[in-house]
Amino acid sequence: MKKLKIVSIIIGVILVIVLTIGGVFTYRTQQALKSLDTNKNSVSKKISQGKPFSILLLGADTGADGRVDRGNSDTMMLLTLNPKKKNTVAYSIPRDALAEMVGDKQKNVQKINAAYNIGLSDMAKNTVGSLLGVPVDYHVAINMDALKKTVDFVGGVTVKSDLKVSFDGVTIPKGTHHLNGKQALTYARMRYQDPRGDYGRQVRQQQVLKAVVDKLESPKYLVKIPDLIKDLGKDISTDLTSKEIDEIILKYHSSADNMDFNQIQGKTAWINQSSYQILPTSTMQNASNNLRDNLGLEPQTLSNTETKLNAKNKKFFANEDDIDYDTFGLDTTHYTDSTY
């Protein structure tokens, strides 16, 4: 069972890794994995040699409320796995964090969750990599409907809510409750009623997914996981091949020994009448240092669009309680390189 702990690490927030890695390790079927392969002849040297690597986990807001477009990535988590150190370091990134869309044709600064919508996984990986100064090797993306299906697959989950949650026609009172898939999706998605905003939602998402992980380890659900993988095929996108997944299972289970999960938190600003999270340079640098250290890389001083804008808006961070500086000096509709 120790090897199944890798499941809990890699998913952190995004359930699909539980399904594709935890399930595949014990009950792998090549047919179920065909929809996950994007380059069947490629096996990463990092993974084949058992070196540290990073993976960006994305939860897109398609598959719920009848959405059929590609959607924004409302959940973003960057993980680094180091089997030699027996360590996993992960950071959740606020969906509303101000960031440059790396790879767009023009200079484009907006909420980081738009990167997946604009340029899919490549832009999301490049944008997160630039923001934190960390090479992003792989991605796994699912849409939100996969969470609903999986919670129903395990017969629901029990959670303890510290507030009343009402969203999408569903109400979950404060207290302990057993939730079905639709209720769990509501519980994991609501953020406007939570005084902690997106940060509170991240906590609830992790709560639901940890409950799912616990139930998936039961033999009665493990034997059915290949069927679930097939059902979720259209809800999953990844650049990991089945060979790479096999290598992860064999060589990275020791990364479960020490798990360090973190949230990157920013300060709210209003830009063009929209609410953003501005990440302090020191916060981004600390995350970068920790992630790079777990990849076996030396620290690197961040110098990107975000840090340059922070340097031009020092008064914004001068006093957290000073409402005179609740706006950030950037007009994204007229943004050019000359802004620097």
Image (cartoon, rainbow, N blue to C red):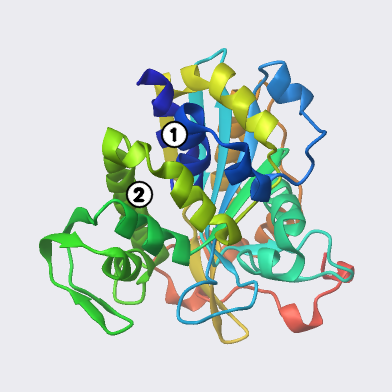
Where 233 falls versus 129 (above or below)? below
Residue positioned 55% across, 38% down in the render: 79
Foreground pick, 216 / 45: 216
Residue drawn at 66 percent across, 17 percent down: 50
Q: Which residue is mark 1?
A: 7
**Which element carries disc 1, helix, strand or loop?**
helix
Label 2 secondary element: helix
What percent of the width, then of the height, locates residue 318?
51, 60
Between 60 and 241, which is closer to the camera in this rendering?
241
* Mark 2 lies on residue: 209
Residue 29 sits above or below residue 202 on the image: above
| Image point (51%, 72%), residue name | 63
Does 65 sit left or right of 174 as displayed?
A: right
Can residue 93 be seen?
no
Note whether residue 252 is visible: yes
Q: Amino acid at mark 2?
A: Leu
Q: Is residue 4 left or right of residue 182?
A: right
The N terminus: image quadrant: top left
Q: Where, by quadrant of the figure, is residue 115 drawn?
A: bottom right
Q: Residue furthest left?
A: 175
Q: Is residue 185 left or right of residue 75?
A: left
**Which three-letter amino acid code belongs to the residue tagged 1?**
Val
**Residue 220 placement: quadrant:** top left
Label 2 environment density (alpha carbons within 10 Å; few <14, some 14–19, many ≥20)? many
Residue 16, image x, y percentages: 50, 48
Q: What's the mark number on residue 130?
A: none
Residue 283 coordinates in the image, percent (x, y):
54, 46
